[in-house]
Amino acid sequence: MAESGEGNWTYADYLNLHPLLDLQGEDRGINADEMHFIIVHQTFELWFKQVIRELSEVRDILSQVPVPEDQIPKAVDHLDRTTEIFRLMANQWTVLETLTPQGFLAFRDGLGTASGFESFQMREFEFLLGLENEDRIGGVDPMDSFRRMSDNEINKAVLARLEAAAGSPSLYDSVMGWIERTPIMGSTPSGEDDAGVVNQYISDHLAAHKALCEEVAQKASGWGASDSSKAAERMMAAHDGAVSFLMPGGDVDRARAGLLFIESYRELPLLTWPRKLIDALVELEESMVKWRHAHARMVERIMGRRIGTGGTSGVDYLDMTSRYRIFKDLWGIRTVLVKPQRRPALQNAEFYGYSSDS
């Protein structure tokens, strides 16, 4: 194969097509259904490789202190591409659904104990995203499976690769570190009275949140709700939840305060790209949830509720993975927002390239 820059490429040479098309197991005499099954999963693995590359780029951009402003749009582009990949992969399950239950059973035994759980690239992008073991089903450490399989040099290299990914800063770490440095009311973490400014902002926001909860409870009573006292209890419980979210352990969480500020003042010019990046992260995670859900439905359609080849509970296990959340704070912040008319008055508006008089 020609080296880059040497002579002319052919289409097949550039894409390494000949080796690629020899990897589907036709030398084993597989039928069309099994070839279909293999190609679909090989395609997933190719997309996983791209997902890892895209997410690594975002993680590295956001790990910079400070993050260059002109890099944020690039990070958003990488996230948008990754979201589209997961949307494409969700639709890819419908291609596999053309495989009939009998067609799958005809070659299923040939898989032995091989399972999608052993996809080391899937585990790698989960580590890269920041999925913690305690958030996995049963708190299972996926590394255990790869440690048991490290019986040759290739598998040992895979294990080393995963251990490196698990021990490296995650995208979640870099995102929350970046959000924590958000200027709040014109104050930055290095500011002389940053703690005072941020605490006052959160105090004012929570006062507005409590007032809104009380108003809703009063309206419920005026509407003749069947049990107005329970409605009031629910609204006060919602407020207590907001306090716990923004002040875990009694102290303001500056990252969550920064996230609240971005979401509350989305129209400020300086916050345009940070807001777009946060939206892109939520959209990415939503696309991943839908991809996992589509996977479960495909498996249920083809093999029902059989035990998985890797010994998992099959569909039930896959359904539980669709509840995984990594960027929980980005979802949770929506619960504690107040309407624009009640948010604290913006201080130092000119810092954000905005003036209410303009």
Image (cartoon, helix red, strand yellow):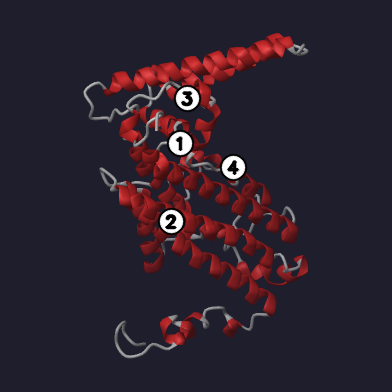
**Residue occupied by mark 1:** 266
Q: In the structure shown, which secondary structural element does the residue marked by tag 1 occupy?
A: loop
Using the rendered view, name the quadrant where residue 148 is placed: bottom left
The residue that disc 2 covers is: 77
Camera-near label (1 vs 4) is 1
Badge 1 amino acid: Arg
- Say which element carries label 4: loop
Whether tag 2 and tag 4 are in contact, CB under 8 A, the answer is no
Q: Is tag 2's residue or tag 4's residue first in the polypeptide sequence?
A: 2
Marks 3 and 2, how far apart at CA: 30 Å
- Residue at 50 percent of width and 64 percent of height: 47
- Mark 2–mark 4 Cα distance, whole angstroms, equals 26 Å
Number of the front mark, 3 or 4: 3
Q: Which mark is residue 136?
A: none
Give the mark nearer the N terminus: 3 vs 2: 2
- Mark 1 neighbour density, 10 Å: few (under 14) some (14–19) many (20 or more): some
Where is residue 353? Give x, y as percent: 34, 37
| Residue at 68% in and 13% down | 219
The answer to whether residue 182 is visible is no
Q: Amino acid at mark 2?
A: Asp
Q: Secondary structure at mark 3?
A: helix
Q: Are marks 3 and 4 in contact (CB under 8 Å)?
A: no
Q: Which residue is mark 4?
A: 323
Please state, as top left, top right, bottom left or bottom right, where the C terminus lies in the image.
top left
Tag 4: residue type?
Answer: Arg
The tag earlier along the polypeptide, 2 or 1, is 2
Picture coordinates of residue 149 (x, y %)? 45, 60
Please name the residue that numbered disc 3 is placed on. 245
- Dot 2 crowding, Cα within 10 Å, few <14, some 14–19, many 20+: some
Residue at left offset 44%, top offset 41%: 275
SS class, disc 2: helix
Q: Earlier in the sequence, mark 3 or mark 1?
A: 3
